[in-house]
Image (spheres, helix red, strand yellow):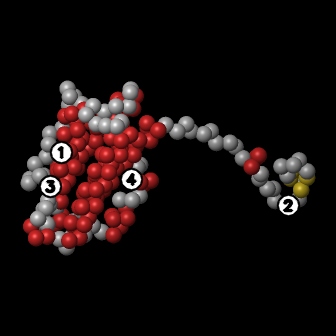
Amino acid sequence: MLLRSTGRPTTGPRTISETDMPKATPVAFSLPQALLTSFETNDRINHYMIENLPTEAWRAEPPAGKGRTVAAIVAHMHNVRVMWLKAAAKGSKIPEQLDRANVTPAQATKALEQSRAALSTVLKSALESDGRVKGFRPDVAGFFAYLIAHDAHHRGQICMLARQVGHPLPQKAMFGMWEWGTRGKSE
């Protein structure tokens, strides 16, 4: 004989009520950690895009010969990060800028990781102190938004340029760049 959650005997299958279920311990949400994780995820998406970009698109000339190549855009993304590090993290180890004419996808990926790590230190420091980033207004939250928006803008340019030069990213990669839940996990 089985007992229902009410304590009454039953001969049928036992039903489990919410009171029978173990309670999950809530995990405290940390906005500073969530922001840092979002910045890391943003960088993983950059890497994912570069890894999935057809090789032929890397140095293909833009339509009508105007504008930057994909290689030059990725170099610019990193070099802007370096510019901010020079302003906000004087005295710390700052990665070298990339040469947009000669950078390879592997060099770009490595440099983006270096600039992400260095900026994460700046961001973490600002989050743990007064919320300010030297040389940037209004505050560290705005800086996070700026950095992610800058990368996202150029990812869009890269995807459009790759399509225009006849070497688009695979459809799976196009959708995969929006999978923040997947890209957010360490691989």
Viewer-proximal residue among 174 and 3 = 174
Q: CA distance from mark 2 to mark 1?
A: 69 Å
Displayed quadrant of residue 177: bottom left
- Residue 137: give x, y in percent of width and height: 31, 37
Q: Which mark is residue 72?
A: 3
Which amino acid type corresponds to the residue marked 2 in the rendered image? Answer: Gly
Please give the residue where the numbered disc 4 appears in the rendered image: 183
Q: Which mark is residue 12?
A: 2
Q: CA distance from mark 3 to mark 1?
A: 10 Å
Q: CA distance from mark 2 to mark 4?
A: 46 Å
Displayed quadrant of residue 121: top left
Compare marks 4 and 3 and give the one earlier in the sequence.
Answer: 3
Viewer-proximal residue among 81 and 139 = 139
Which residue is the extreme one toward the right?
8
Q: CA distance from mark 4 to mark 1?
A: 23 Å
| Residue pictured at 32% horizontal, 51% vertical | 149
Please give the residue where the numbered disc 1 appears in the rendered image: 79
